[in-house]
Amino acid sequence: MYAQGLICRKCKKTYPLDNRYHCTECKGLLEVFYDYNKIKQVGKSMFTRELSSIWKYAELLPLGKTSRVVSLGEGGTPLLRADNTGRGLGLRNLFLKLESHNPTGSFKDRPTSVAVSKAVEEGAETIVIASSGNAGASAAAYAARAGLRCVVYVPKNTPENKIEQALSHGAQVNEVSGPYSNSFRAAAESSNMPCWVNVTSTFYNPYTVEGDKTVAYEIWEQMGGNVPDWIAIPIGAGPLLVGTYKGFTELVALGLVSKLPRMVGVQSESCAPIAHAFNRGSKTVEAWPEKIDTVASGIADPLIGYPEDGTTTLNVIRKSAGLAITVDDEEILDAGRRLAKEEGVFAEPTAASCLAGVKKLIDTDIVSPLDTIIAVITGHGLKTPNSLLDRGK
Ligand SMILES: *Cc1c(COP(=O)(O)O)cnc(C)c1O
Ligand SMILES: [Zn+2]
């Protein structure tokens, strides 16, 4: 195995690759680290493998060689040119990474596959997760496949189809009143039960970001070894953005590329703790105090009790010379309709928000019409089937 251990993002203390969530010294978030010099010897071969799942990159994932992989064929999603929408926005090189093509309809299958496989390796009997809907649906499916019990905590306003997915896979679903952070806390409180593993795909479970990062490897392969100028991603706490950037930094560490993309985090105006800190020029993110009301429920995370998760994402956005942007519900729904009518791509509003963010990015004037921009379509429109229809107008 090339993964060497877990390292605290704050104090750099290291730990073995076991089931733990925080640094015992400083409570900091943990991250997996690797021996990239050893992985270099594998060379490019893993990138040319035929296997259409994230496990084609097994050397860059934190699972033992003989461990059981819990997979539903996640990853290997299409990268489409979006010339119709691109033309309308004045962009020559707009691409969509269709994460909606994953087994349960969202990118969450990448982090879930890694975290559930790791939980099985650690002898888990029950998987617990806090979710705004998609991660719960995903965890329920992977738990079913692995023969584990699954307990999901979601906010009360979670889209019905996402809850039905989780229930169909046999999960116990608990609806928690208040914002997502209350569900987060409920899941964290049950993490200490023996043989329970918390696979919450914020930074809570340190293995989930490892699944997220495979988006970068695929983009690099699909672009014929090139790196895009910009990648726009809808962000709650932001692990998908952080993971995607980590994937590109690993390609640099492996000597395969020399350029890194600029990361654009898109938040709903109604819940924008990270964008708010970015715009204030602040070093740290603060929890979002206001009432939340948005069509983009998948990114409505006020970070109450864990604002440092947002700071981790803020740091990566800054390091990449990127931006954090807010969009309102009208802009999000307009972007969703564009994708549906101009490109044939059905995205849930949360996912469409990244295209709304791209539109704003163009207005900032720091983007050239020739820049390559990838919008990551994180979840399928069938998750929220009536959300884009505007029958009145
Ligand atoms: C979870 C989710 C996000 C947010 O991703 P994070 O990595 O948690 O920031 C974005 N879009 C969709 C559709 C999601 O389900
Ligand atoms: Zn620490």
Image: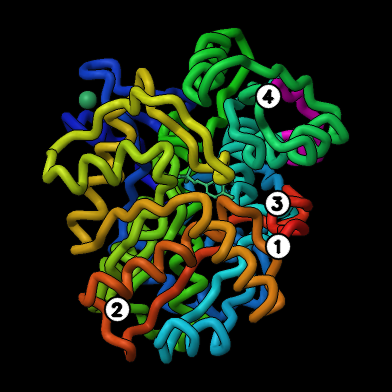
- Residue 257 - label: 2
Q: Earlier in the sequence, mark 2 or mark 4?
A: 4
Q: Which residue is mark 3?
A: 387
Quadrant location of the C terminus?
bottom right
Colouring scheme, one of rainbow, by chain, secondary structure, one colour: rainbow
Instruction: Based on the picture, tell me whether residue 26 belongs to the magenta stretch.
Output: no
Q: Nearer the viewer, mark 2 or mark 1?
A: 1
Of residue 248 and residue 36, the one placed in the foreground of this image is 248
Q: Secondary structure at mark 2?
A: loop
Under 8 Å from ligand 1: the CB of mark 2?
no
Q: Nearer the viewer, mark 3 or mark 4?
A: 3
Magenta-colored span: 140-151
Q: Alpha-carbon neighbours of circle 3 within 10 Å: few (<14), some, or many (≥20)?
A: some
Q: Secondary structure at mark 3?
A: loop
Residue 76 can be seen in this image: no
Q: Nearer the viewer, mark 4 or mark 1?
A: 1
Q: Which residue is mark 1?
A: 393
Q: Earlier in the sequence, mark 2 or mark 1?
A: 2
* Quarter of the figure with residue 118: top right
Q: Which residue is mark 4?
A: 152
| Residue at 36 percent of width and 51 percent of height | 326
- Residue 30 - label: none
In the shown orientation, is residue 101 left or right of residue 114? right
Q: Secondary structure at mark 4?
A: strand
Mark 2 belongs to which amino acid? Answer: Val
Q: Earlier in the sequence, mark 3 or mark 4?
A: 4
| Residue at 83 percent of width and 30 percent of height | 167
Under 8 Å from ligand 1: the CB of mark 3?
no
